[in-house]
Image (cartoon, rainbow, N blue to C red):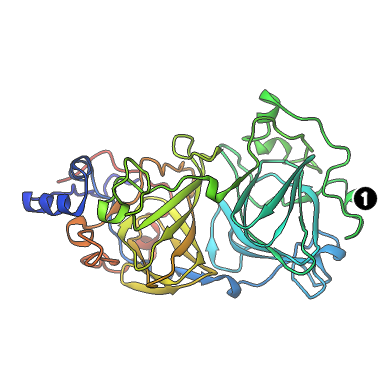
Amino acid sequence: MDKTIPYIRTEFSQDDKEILRKSGFSETQITEMCDKPAYPVIGSREGYFDKITETDIPKSATASYPSWFRGTGPNSSYNDDSTYWYRWVMGPKGMVQSGLISNKISVGTGLFKPNTKYPVHNHVPWELYFILEGKGIFVKNDRRYDIASEDFIITRPYDPHAIKNTSKTKRLKFLWIAWLEEEAKLDIMSMGGRPINPKECWKDQENASLFPMPIPPVLSGRDADRYLYDATTVSDKPIYPVIGSREGYLDKITETDIPKSAAENYPTWFRGTGPNNSYNDDSTYWYRWVVGPRESVQSGLVSNEIAVGTGVFKPKAKYPVHNHPYWELYFVLKGEGVFVKNDRRYDIMPGDFIIVRPYDPHGLKNTSKRKPLKILWICWQEGNVKLDITHTGGQPINPVKCWRDQESACLSPVPTPPPLTGKDADKYLVGLHLTQTNET
């Protein structure tokens, strides 16, 4: 980051520290907030939008797939004879219609009609599926998994995989996230999903195959790793390599298999009184961390580029105003609430996507007195910056004023910073690092 940008150390009086102690901040956290520079608290970015509803995004069907599967609509458009559709929420400029642009990740939802098969295919990016509704089967090579709501499934580069909706009456819906790890230089969507053995596996709906033919041998050791981080090795090849299952790698995990957590840097009135990052009954919220850095996740799904998880806020819970140096996308799964960025307030409900850009002050409230508010969250960095969510997590903004207790917790920063425009609105978006020189 530009080192001319000042970072003011947080200074607390003895009275302030006593307020923070009564709020349930630990002595370690109070000392830490005093010792390290706070993140810059910036104003809303004029000209950027913050929220979009899933149904505002047009349905699409991949133009390169056969008409029995994708339908007969022109280009990539969906029509009534399509067996599936997707809505592309975030991705490269020129490809997505939502306005949510990213060069690092691609996000969307997909839906398969009853009895639909998505035959065996593969692609360069990593991909994570989260099942939203319905039941089906998911196949990787010769491994077959029953899938249902709250299952996460991961595919690694070049994994042959396929899906079938096993219901005759109900749809199968999922959210997908695609990304590249490490030093891969490819445009994330420059090489989309390609049919494997299309002559045999993609004939028609009845004969479509979920398994590659023939099934490649199982990989282990270096053979299992060689394709994961250097996708450029096949950038000029007409077909992708069809590799075997990787021994020792996890393919599927159910959300409820992941322990509930509550961030230990927050006060006890919010996070509860469990030790370290653990949730207990007096927590007002919890999260389950599904994908992320090796030292942070317990799921076994490790990534150096993205972090993914779910979060639940109990009835009437507030998540007070805070910020962080990375991008974040929320997808509302259940419940209703309000989401605040600076002084902008949005009503949120299932199907809403909300984007948080680096250093955006934001807060959240469950407005229901009876029902939980549940979200899925995705964090990442743009440009060549590695995600470091573990060490640069959300910092409370004005904790003495805004994080005292549940009743008085602020969703907006106090005071609200002025809006940013032009270059001022853009300068924090890419290539962010905490400064090494702090001003007092």
**Dividing the picture into quarters, in which one does residue 320 lie?**
bottom left
Assign the N terminus to one quadrant of the image.
top left
Q: Position of residue 45 (x, y in %)?
A: 37, 66
Q: Where is residue 381 in the image (x, y as percent from the top left)?
A: 47, 48
Decide which of 117, 239 is in the foreground and name it: 117
Q: Which three-letter amino acid code belongs to the residue tagged 1? A: Lys
- Secondary structure of the residue carrying tag 1 is helix
Whether residue 345 sits left or right of residue 309 in the image: it is left
What residue lies at 26% left-to-right and 47% top-to-bottom? 4
Which residue lies most toward the left here? 14
Number of numbered discs visible in the structure rendering: 1
* Residue 228 in the image: above or below residue 324: above
Q: Position of residue 202 (x, y in %)?
A: 88, 54
Whether residue 267 sits left or right of residue 94 in the image: it is left
* Residue 307 in the image: above or below residue 285: above
Circle 1 residue: 199
Q: Where is residue 10 in the image (x, y as percent from the top left)?
A: 18, 49
What residue lies at 80% left-to-right and 39% top-to-bottom? 142
What residue lies at 59% left-to-right and 57% top-to-bottom? 107
Decide which of 39, 426 is in the foreground and name it: 39
Q: Tell me if residue 430 can be seen.
A: yes
Q: Tell me if residue 187 can be seen.
A: no
Whether residue 308 sits left or right of residue 72 in the image: it is left
What residue lies at 47% left-to-right and 62% top-to-bottom? 374
**Label 1: few (<14), some (14–19) or many (≥20) C-alpha neighbours in 10 Å:** few
